[in-house]
Amino acid sequence: MKHPNHVKKLREQKLMSKAELARLAGVSAVTIDRIENGETCRMETKRKIILALGFSLVDKDKVFQD
């Protein structure tokens, strides 16, 4: 089951590579790739990505749709 999100779109709008987002979020680039492809991830990983993209946690719906 795919989990739609806006991670790739937001990352590209900020002209960030997967590696750069991964470094800022403290996760692997493989993890970023999986999430952009709609695979599930832990809540903690979502939190890290939201913050690394420059959003606050109350804006989580702008990044993840679940």
Image (cartoon, rainbow, N blue to C red):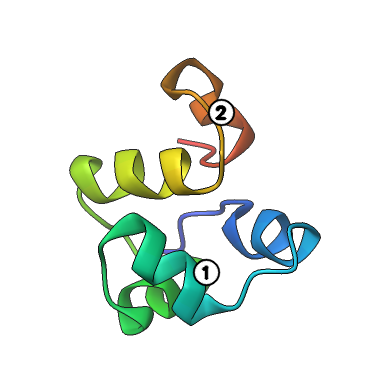
Residue at the outermost right position: 13
Residue at the outermost top position: 58
Q: Secondary structure at mark 1?
A: helix
Q: Position of residue 14 (x, y in %)?
A: 73, 58
The answer, for residue 35, to whether it is visible in the render is no
Q: Which residue is mark 1?
A: 36
Image quarter hosting the N terminus: bottom left
Q: Is residue 54 above or below residue 4?
A: above
* Residue closest to the eye, 59 or 14: 14
State the mark number for residue 14.
none
Residue flagged by tag 1: what amino acid is it? Glu
Residue at x 74%, y 67% (from the top left corner): 12
Image quarter hosting the C terminus: top left
Q: Position of residue 5 (x, y in %)?
A: 57, 51
Report the side of 15 relative to 42 (left or right): right
Report the side of 66 relative to 46 (left or right): right
* Residue closest to the eye, 31 or 40: 31
Q: Secondary structure at mark 2?
A: helix
Residue at x 34%, y 56% (from the top left corner): 25
- Residue 39, by quadrant, is bottom left
Q: Position of residue 57 (x, y in %)?
A: 42, 23
The Cα–Cα distance between marks 2 and 1, rounded to whole angstroms, is 15 Å
Residue flagged by tag 2: what amino acid is it? Asp
Q: Position of residue 58 (x, y in %)?
A: 48, 15
Residue at x 46%, y 55% (from the top left corner): 3
Q: For label 1, count other residues whose C-alpha is less than 10 Å away and answer few (under 14), some (14-19) or many (20+).
A: some
Q: Which residue is mark 2?
A: 61
Mark found first going from the N terminus, 2 or 1: 1
